[in-house]
Image: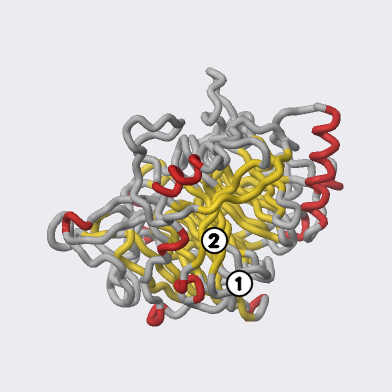
Amino acid sequence: MNRRGFLAGSASLVAVLTALHSRRASAASRASRSVEGPYGPLRPVADLETGLPLILLPEGFNYRTYSWSGDAMPGGEPTPDQHDGMGVVATKGSGADLEVTLVRNHERPVTSPILAPARYDTSSPRGPGMGPGGGTTTLKFRGRRWASVEPSLGGTIYNCAGGVTPWGTWLSCEETVIDLTSRGGRRHGYIFEVRPDAAVTTAKPIVDMGRMKHEAVAVDADSKIAYMTEDQPGHSGFYRFLPKDTSGTPGSYEAGGRLQSARVVGRPNADLRNPAVGDLHHIDWVYIADPDQSPGVEPGTVSRLRKEASGTSVQAWAAGAVWLSKAEGICQHAGKFYVVDSEAGVDTLHRPGHGDGAVWEFDPAASTLRAIFVAGRQIVGDNIDNITVSPRGGILMCEDGDPVTDRYGPGTRLIGLTGEGDSYAFAKNIVRLGREQLLTAGKRIAPNDYRGEEWAGACFDANGEVLFANIQNPGITFAIWGPWERGNL
């Protein structure tokens, strides 16, 4: 592999765009490729905590797991399952003195609730002990060891992804528009701000950020504008929230603001479901008059929207907003935002919106949306979902598809993006556990082959020393470290 593509810091993103522009000009390819990564081949690595070989990593990398589903938290409550989006809200020190605070989502339905100090909906729509089961837990990591975990938000549903704020909090997103008011509960489909100290989290829904199947959010540190994705297959939008309070302090978003949806200039309802690497679109924004509008399309309405479309989607489409397949992760680095459409592309029947995924780069300064990665084939990337950028500027993506079979066998992967816009496998899920292994490790999950389960919540500490990530089911959180300087992550 040509190592010139693996540049450090923001220069690596410049290299991506330069190479992509050249590729588009020569019409050499409509999609990205799968290549050997800068860190070398992968090999099985044993977990320093349990001794179990759970993932494949390059030579020189190690990891430690923590807070598996079912593990007892300090108060005795079992760790909730369905580990999903996650973010670092605080970093102190470095090396042996590194201290990191993370907030982790749990994408859970109506089930046993998370007993956090702050709970939004305390109803029991399915009987005693069965309430909105989503929410967050907060984890501490010190040196190269895990230190603690505690519940920090409860009473929500399907907390999928989210995003950190520049002021050190976590925005947790509900991926649902269920309404439990008829069963003594509350409406869902909102974003909630989680403070590092669970005791001061309010569980107040930020209604003006919209009621929809939220996926992820990323915040511009200068303007305090939040950019958001909507995970509604067939009618996903790309949104931004303009806060009234731009102080950039905990609770400032709870004061409200205005919601907008992206539109391609001069092309109402532009269909962006089948992009090519290098595609470039100029974007403007349309206002959403009622961010809390109930879902559904009125009978007789002529549109591409299905009846379960969110109220924000209905209003955005009527104003000419863009058409994405299934918007998932979003992250930001050096003033640019990276947006995942996990089903962009076409399938074997050439149906748009049934592909393996793409990444768009949004540049707020230029108001442009550019395709920098298009999977095209499962081996290149299979329904990528969450996305992160390391402090050095390297892009890392989480797979949420089938267990991709490559030279290492089947399993989902953490995928890096090279300077040329191609993908490489950085880590691979090989979690396949029997009863005796689990008994020895003291874990309370069911024995099973989990190699097809999704990666989620990838994020780096502020120094770029440790990568944190989840395998959603059976619910395992990883801390990974090693010679990052060998590549672009």
Residue depicted at 64% across the width and 78% down the height: 96
Residue 346 pos. (x, y %)? 57, 26
Q: Would you identify the image quadrant in which residue 116 lies?
A: bottom left
Above or below, comparing residue 17 to residue 22 in the picture? below
**Residue 164: in sight, yes or no?**
yes
**Residue 476: in sight, yes or no?**
no
Above or below, comparing residue 220 to residue 216 in the picture? below
Indicate the colouring scheme.
secondary structure
Residue depicted at 72% across the width and 61% down the height: 335
Residue 182 pos. (x, y %)? 18, 54
Above or below, comparing residue 437 to residue 358 in the picture? below
Q: Is residue 68 left or right of residue 111?
A: right
Residue 245 pos. (x, y %)? 54, 75
Q: Considering the numbered disc 2 on the image, is that residue within a helix, a strand or a loop?
A: strand
CB under 8 Å between discs 1 and 2: no
Give the position of the C terminus as an image quadrant.
Answer: bottom right
Q: Which residue is mark 2?
A: 241
Q: Which residue is mark 1?
A: 166
Residue depicted at 43% across the width and 43% down the height: 314
Above or below, comparing residue 363 to residue 468 in the picture? above
Q: Is residue 448 left or right of residue 37?
A: left
Amino acid type, residue under disc 1 in the picture: Pro
Alpha-carbon span between mark 1 and mark 2: 15 Å
Q: Residues within 10 Å of mark 1 (few under 14, many from 20)?
A: some
Q: Earlier in the sequence, mark 1 or mark 2?
A: 1
The dot on residue 465 is: none
